[in-house]
Image (cartoon, coloured by chain):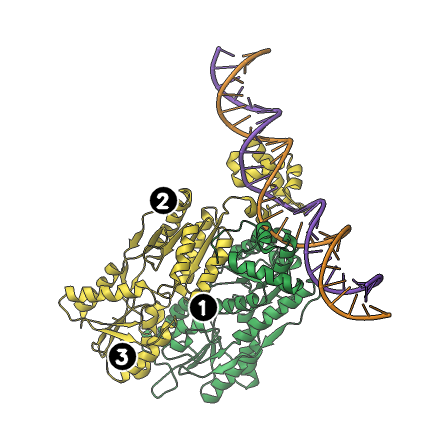
Chain colours: A green, B yellow, C purple, D orange
Amino acid sequence: MTDQKIKNMEEFAAKSGVSRPTVSKYFNDPASVRKTTRARIETALERYDFRPNVYAVNQNRRLTKNIGIVVPYVADPFFAEIARNIEKRCIDAGFSPSTYSSHGRPEQEVEILDTLRSMRPAGVLLAPLGRASDRKSIEAFCHDVPTVLFDSNIEDIGATFIGSDNFQSVPLLVDYLCRTGEPPCFFEMAPVNPNAKKRRDAYLMAMNNLGHTPNVIRASGEGWEFENVGYSEGRRILSEGAFPSQTILCSNDRIAIGLLAAAYETGVHVGITEGCSLRVAGHDDHPFSKFTCPSLTTVAQDYAAISERSVESLLALIEGGGNDSVDGALFKGQLVMRSSA
Amino acid sequence: MTDQKIKNMEEFAAKSGVSRPTVSKYFNDPASVRKTTRARIETALERYDFRPNVYAVNQNRRLTKNIGIVVPYVADPFFAEIARNIEKRCIDAGFSPSTYSSHGRPEQEVEILDTLRSMRPAGVLLAPLGRASDRKSIEAFCHDVPTVLFDSNIEDIGATFIGSDNFQSVPLLVDYLCRTGEPPCFFEMAPVNPNAKKRRDAYLMAMNNLGHTPNVIRASGEGWEFENVGYSEGRRILSEGAFPSQTILCSNDRIAIGLLAAAYETGVHVGITEGCSLRVAGHDDHPFSKFTCPSLTTVAQDYAAISERSVESLLALIEGGGNDSVDGALFKGQLVMRSSA
DNA sequence: TACCTAAGTTTACGCGCGTAAAATTTAGAT
DNA sequence: ATCTAAATTTTACGCGCGTAAACTTAGGTA
């Protein structure tokens, strides 16, 4: 490996003894050039380690090899993990992913989509904010760019949707809770997205199916600071003794984490062992749920399946020229029994 | 706003009644064109909403307006937050930040740097992995690209370093702990970066200064799964009754979070109230520290100051053509007294 | 050995924009 | 009204690469 700098593809082509366009072909698909040619280029590559100018490449390709990934909130480890998972799969498929976070703000989401559009990406994987999203902007975007929605759906938008089947996962947990103790009440915030709404509906359905009376507790609070809401509202309600059941199913793990902290501080013992007066369960199997006190019983979303299928769908969509829509998928959750319920 | 699509700057210039290069000037600095001209362009802008092709722009500019942000692990909310903070400041300064995560893997870090280099960014803000980092690669990178290190330093690399002053923050906590109870032992993993090492050294120093005998407990385990290590090693050591002090200062909050879970499960009561047999403190004021059981006493790093100063330094560096190095800075931590110690 | 075809390579052109240098306009002073 | 320096705009060229079309070559067949 010499340290000599190669300025451009022309120069590199000269070094390797082939014409520039041939080198270009090679970089677009190494298998498309003759074996002997490929060998020459690769030999030169080892010596000079040249990389085509990204900007020139993207300017001239009809479609870039970029894939945009948009999540509502990266500071939530759940999304950080799934984004990482998706990134990896994109890279393996030969694309260049880049991840953006809406940070819970609709304007930011629109801004990201604008930026993304101007990058002419091959496709986009979008986990929308949900209710707060600017529906029109997203619709327009999906019209222009092959887009797969994941995690949270927006009806009739995007080529397809990949997510969890809340109507499977929530009843699973409800069944378990009813089977092992007092039927749960449901602790939620004003739904930020369809998932939250579906979970509540799934809870109502499951309870009715089992012949129990459902009971929804709505915590006041907005935004994405779930722990905070779970904590402060949890404290308030606990101190008033106002939870209608000793079993509380939270709309997601982050609310449950807040509630557990509230219970701890209020002196309410949570868990399934002797001397506990409250059971708490969550939903998602958040990376931190293993480390709550007590550890949180929850339903694990199938990260791997969701990210894999999302990428697959997007690639299929890209392959097909972005025209035909692709089948969506809802994955089942898995019960994770820990100590809190 | 008509829906007519503008293909390129040429076309847009025609619509606004000025020449293309003038439009180009406008986009580089609106103040650099005559007021009447600006008005024309902006009128047209409202009608057609045109954006210059990013790739063409970046291909031709000597230096792009891109800024790279590299963190060791975005799934750690601490880094997610600081990255977000930095992003915002870059945008405000008229740059286009993009964030990358090494995911704890040195190869990935090198890969990111390679990608970044080929993007010819104006500058890079790098929080290196630390010990695991490939020093040579990073050194070479910093030689080519104006780079400011933050959070974790690598001696003699990069134009400057911005971070926390562990030799202030750790003694602060040690003082507090000694003042309020039994002097702490120090619970750490094999240091992944200079911060971890400095914290231990600062602990040793602080204890000696106070005339106490320091005591370091090394948890076996590697990587960035701090909670896991804190938890499993915590359980082991607790069950053996092997912590040499009833006060445990953890190298960071994430280890403390794991340890708290271990204590809870082992039936060891943590806190400063009657009936507690253990005190636990952390370092960083991790976003989740408020919600541990009990809530975690820790030292808050000055997120805001670090991110602000990092960006300022980088901008100064870019301004100066990347030549002259810029002053570094270490910010003080603030004691956050909660319930665990 | 001559010939054919498919695979691979080269020629030639354009992508959309930055920017130096030339040409023009503006504004202040006479 | 006229001149001049400064401010602004235009002309002209190049950036690094993708890609269609023209051109070679390799490898197999009769």
As drawn, A27 above or below A249: above
**Residue at 51% over, 58% down:** A47
Dot 1 falls on which chain? A
Residue B180 x, y percent position in the rendering: 18, 69
Q: Which residue is mark 1?
A: A77
Circle 1 residues within 10 Å: few <14, some 14–19, many ≥20: some
Residue B207 x, y percent position in the rendering: 18, 67
**Residue at 39% over, 46% down:** B317
Relative horizontal placement of residue B255, taking residue B92 as reference (left or right): left
Of A243 and B107, the residue lying toward us: B107
Circle 3 residues within 10 Å: few <14, some 14–19, many ≥20: many
Relative horizontal placement of residue B180, taking residue A12 as reference (left or right): left
Residue B101 x, y percent position in the rendering: 45, 63
Q: The C terminus of chain B is located in which quarter?
A: bottom left
Alpha carbon distance from label 1 to label 3: 28 Å
Alpha carbon distance from label 1 to label 2: 38 Å
Q: State whether residue A92 appears in this view.
A: yes
**Residue at 40% over, 53% down:** B142
As drawn, B86 above or below B241: above
Dot 3 falls on which chain? B
Give the label, 3 or 2, closer to the camera: 2
**Residue at 32% over, 54% down:** B156
Q: State whether residue A29 appears in this view.
A: no
Res. A147 image quadrant: bottom right
Do marks 1 and 2 both belong to one polypeptide chain? no
As shown in the figure, which amino acid type bears the numbered disc 2?
Asp
Res. B320 image quadrant: top left
Do marks 3 and 2 both belong to one polypeptide chain? yes
Report the disc number at residue B324. Answer: 2
Q: Which residue is mark 3?
A: B269
